[in-house]
Image (cartoon, helix red, strand yellow):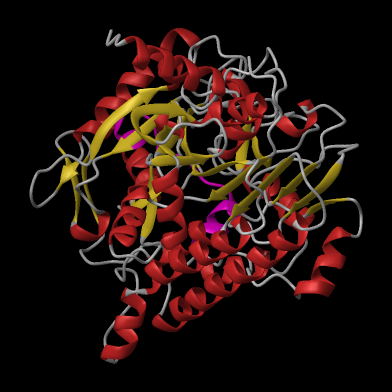
Amino acid sequence: METTRHPVVMIGLDAAEIDVINRLISEGRLPHLARLRQDGWCGKLRADPASFLSMVWPTFSSAQPMGHHAWYYNKLWRPERSQLEYVSPDWLPIGNFVRDLPPDLRVAVLDLPFAADAPVGLNGLYLNGWQCHDDFGKQESPTGLRAELERRHGKPRMVPEVFGPQTTRTLRELRAMVCASDAQFGDVCRDVLGREAWDLFLAVFGSTHRGSHYLWDLSQVDLQGTDPEARRELEGALAECFESADRALGRILELVGEEARILVFALHGMGPNRGWFEYLPRLLDQIHRGGGAAEPKKGLLFRLKKVLPWTLVRQVTRRIPHSWNKALVPLWSRRMYDWGSTRYWALPTDHNGYIRVNLEGRDARGIVRPDDLPRVYEEVRAGLMSFRDSTTGRPIVSDVVLTDQAVGKDAPRRDQLPDMVVLWRDEVSVADVEGVTSDRYGEIRWGKGGRFPSGRSGNHTDHGWLVAKGPGLAQGNSEDVHDIADLIPTAFRWLGIPVPSHYVGRPIPGLTEDDVEAVAKEAGSGHRG
């Protein structure tokens, strides 16, 4: 194991799609990332299992897989209460690598997404909720850090996400906000980096995530009457967001010494939004009704929530304290359905479809007997696989994965997870079809050309990536795919400290001095294996 302690600088570009980066680098528009890739070691990252792509950061932060931390979305089902809740360390403790660092290490962590709580007794600085894409509250250590940074740099330019229909005006405002946020967060990072020689500095840009969701393409806005110049501006907006992040990255790296090891990364990427997850409840209701049971009855608050426009709901929720939002979720979710007649239902999600079975003995109001579970699984799987584009006959579902197979039936927190995950066919979009039909469950129509309730034109891919540079590290490109849980153990190795035994992630081969020396020795001996 390495004994030399290297300062470590980790910069996350949240959900920055590698295909976009490759294109912009080839066009000469991301000079700082291009230089880093030329001088460093490039590799690929994936979340495991890829079926739970909506929530990747807890796997990174804890160096443990989904079955161990069970944080699959921003709101989780609590089976013992039959309701949804935001994650809280009071009932679902989530590991955070910062707690495992030796007390003598000086650490600065800025905007680590979905950090459930700020570590107590941190030897350094900890800031969250400045410009994260996902609004998960605000944390700071020491107290007063946020106010100090606001005095020096102004209030955060990034505002909470507003779901719902978009317009050319809102997209232009979003582009301006993202670029301004990049510049401001770059200043904040330089401010913190310049204060002292940190052993570990970690910062994550949330702007690439926000911009990629809404500026991926113009499919979710009405372009009628838009002048050509405004349209060209919007068509180039995503590239501008990546360029502004690259400029900020370059300014940050100016302050990094030659003795440091640098890791720039994205845990996942972005591609076109196909929109199917928003229609999963309708598909499941159709199967539920056709499978010998009545259509699930829905509670009043849940029905009201579904009827109100997302823009109105989000305009309200973004203006009330985060604690109020957390309190509202259990109120409407505990009566989502009549649990006495509901065998399965769709959990909230924003990518793949999540399905929960109302299981007797596990869920507080469970009605499905454990020995009936295989039959229910097959009913749902066969039903979803039977739906096809009503015009072309193309299937819309690629697969329905059992969570027991994806994470293991005996995973420590298996009971907190959905029971099935729906994988959609990537080549079929909701907006391109008139509706779907099933030989057994009939037809559901919604009309071609509609826009998604979320207003998002982009959604996630599993295209994670990393670039590493520093003393003792090799240069080049690796085609090997590494788990996102391996990044923190790699940083621990660079810091010259042991990787905790409870981590499932391991240091990435090729990114330690031991590995580089072994490769050099093998090359010198002429051995090719």
**Residue at the image point whose x is 82% and y is 37% from the top:** 119
Residue 301 among those drawn in magenta? yes
Residue span colored magenta: 287-309
Q: Mark yes or no: residue 380 visible.
A: no
Which residue is rendered at x = 32% and y = 35% of the image? 423
**Percent coordinates x, y for residue 113 in the rendering:** 63, 47
Percent position of residue 519, x then y: 41, 18
213 vs 391, nearest the viewer: 213
Q: Is residue 59 magenta?
A: no
Q: The N terminus lies in which quarter of the figure?
A: top right
Above or below 355: residue 529: above
Vertical order, 190 against 45 (above or below)? below
Residue 386 placement, left or right of 329: left
Image quadrant where residue 439 sits: top left
Q: Nearer the viewer, residue 512 or 508?
A: 512
The percent coordinates of residue 416 (x first, y second) are 60, 25
Residue 5 horizontal side relative to residue 306, left or right: right
Q: Quadrant of the rendered structure where residue 312 is?
A: bottom right
Residue pictured at 28% horizontal, 59% vertical: 26
Confirm whether residue 346 shows in the render: yes
